[in-house]
Amino acid sequence: MVCLIFDADDTLWENNVLFERVVGAYLDWVAHPTLDRTAARAVLDEVERANVAVHGYGSTSFLRSLHDCFERLSQRPASAAEAAEITELARALTFDEVELVPGVADTLTQLGSRHELLLLTKGAPAEQQRKIDASGLAHHFRSLHIVPEKDVATYRSLVADRRLTPATTWMIGNSPRSDILPARAAGLGAVFIPNPHTWALEHDELDESDAGVLHLKAFPQLVQHF
């Protein structure tokens, strides 16, 4: 039996676009006197990269990065008023509702009638579970897996735990770094469905000659291949 493993954020529903809106408002607010927006954003990316390695993913880690970036840019701690403003900027990240990618629900219904579907997402467990609950999609999946990181070991562990056959198992997602490259290294097939709002830290180079990676433009195209 074919098993299809689905990423969640920015594959099933929009996610990073919400963070990007906060980042845009943050960069407008911080208004560094000498660095332009591109340079200030590069500092934030560097801070986020360091923080996710220690504190993981999600809105709490993101808020920490906004505070840390302010201190790096300003070369001083934020005042109580400034800290409150930064926290307020990030308050929009509640995830009580999610916006599904077009065609997701119908496509999962069709695929679930003939294949085993799993969900694999990384991040803070409570936060990711809120998104899953808000999406109304949980019933499509045989099992749900929320992990701190999606690396080669994660995929190998999932294969072993679920007794999957790598040759007939496919990982479907928008992130080269977390969905495609580690799945391929673990011996799985992969389906890359790009999202224009994919987080910069999830970008990576894909081998265009790799026949084990299927490139699609839109989620509903999955029914033409599986």
Image (cartoon, rainbow, N blue to C red):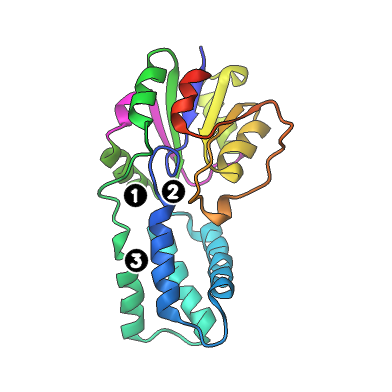
Q: Amino acid at mark 2?
A: Gly
Q: Dot 3: within a 10 Å radius of its alpha carbon, few (fewer than 14), some, or many (20 or more) residues?
A: many
Q: Amino acid at mark 3?
A: Ala
Location of mark 3 (residue): 90
Q: Is residue 151 above or below residue 224?
A: below
Location of mark 1 (residue): 127
Q: Is residue 148 magenta?
A: yes
First of labels 3, 1 by sequence position = 3
* Residue 123: assigned label: 2
Inspect this view and state whether residue 152 appears. Answer: no
Q: Amino acid at mark 1?
A: Glu
Tell me if label 2 and label 1 are in contact, CB under 8 Å.
yes
Label 3 – label 1 distance at C-alpha: 14 Å
Tell me if label 3 and label 1 are in contact, CB under 8 Å.
no
Please tell me which residue is depicted at 43% across the width and 23% down the height of the picture.
Answer: 117
Please tell me which residue is depicted at 32% across the width and 39% down the height of the picture.
Answer: 132
Secondary structure of residue under mark 3: helix
First of labels 3, 2 by sequence position = 3
In the rendering, at what x and y percent does residue 197 appear?
48, 51
Please tell me which residue is depicted at 57% across the width and 64% down the height of the picture.
Answer: 50
Q: Is residue 89 above or below residue 140?
A: below
Q: Is residue 1 magenta?
A: no
Front residue of 158/200: it is: 200
Q: Dot 1: within a 10 Å radius of its alpha carbon, few (fewer than 14), some, or many (20 or more) residues?
A: some
